[in-house]
Amino acid sequence: MQLVAEYADRVAVMESGRLTACGAPGEVFADAELIARAGLRVPPLARALAPLATHPELRTVTRVADLPGVARDDGADNAPGIRCR
């Protein structure tokens, strides 16, 4: 899952052939119940930061580039929200 978190801009989760979530990796992986139901594991960085989940800036961090204060050079938007395209 760490490779998905590092390289994917969007993540889709399916359960029993149905799309149950679609969105930014940080938002999708932040839903631990959804990930468990789908038989997946959250990325290692997200597991390491789980005790800090109540911190608003750390709740959706799944990759180093998402950490507060890390400069981004890809122009990507860090805004939360699950949207399917």
Image (cartoon, grey):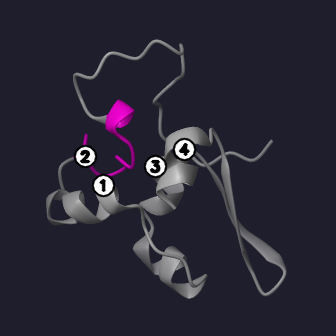
Q: Residue at x 52, y 62 (%)?
A: 1
Q: Amino acid at mark 2?
A: Leu
* CA–CA distance in space, label 1 to label 4: 20 Å
Residue under pointer 4? 81
Of circles 2 and 4, the one toward us is: 2
Q: Are marks 4 and 3 in contact (CB under 8 Å)?
A: no
* CA–CA distance in space, label 2 to label 1: 11 Å
Q: What secondary structure is found at the residue carrying circle 4?
A: loop
Q: Amino acid at mark 1?
A: Leu
Residue 71 among magenta residues: no
Of circles 4 and 3, the one toward us is: 3
Point out the tag, 1 or 4, that comes first from the N-terminus.
1
Which x, y percent locates residue 44? 33, 61
Q: Amino acid at mark 4?
A: Gly
* CA–CA distance in space, label 1 to label 3: 11 Å
Q: Are marks 2 and 4 in contact (CB under 8 Å)?
A: no
Residue under pointer 1? 45
Magenta part mainly helix, strand or loop? Answer: loop
Q: Are marks 1 and 3 in contact (CB under 8 Å)?
A: no
Task: Report whether 21 appears left or right of 27.
Answer: right
- Position of residue 44 relative to residue 27, above or below, is below
Q: What secondary structure is found at the residue carrying circle 2?
A: loop
* CA–CA distance in space, label 4 to label 3: 9 Å
Point out the tag, 1 or 3, that comes first from the N-terminus.
3
- Say which of 53 and 9 sits in front: 9
Q: Amino acid at mark 3?
A: Gly
Tell me, yes or no, if residue 11 can be seen here: yes
Q: Which span is picked out in magenta?
A: 56-66
Residue 26 disc label? 3
* CA–CA distance in space, label 3 to label 2: 10 Å
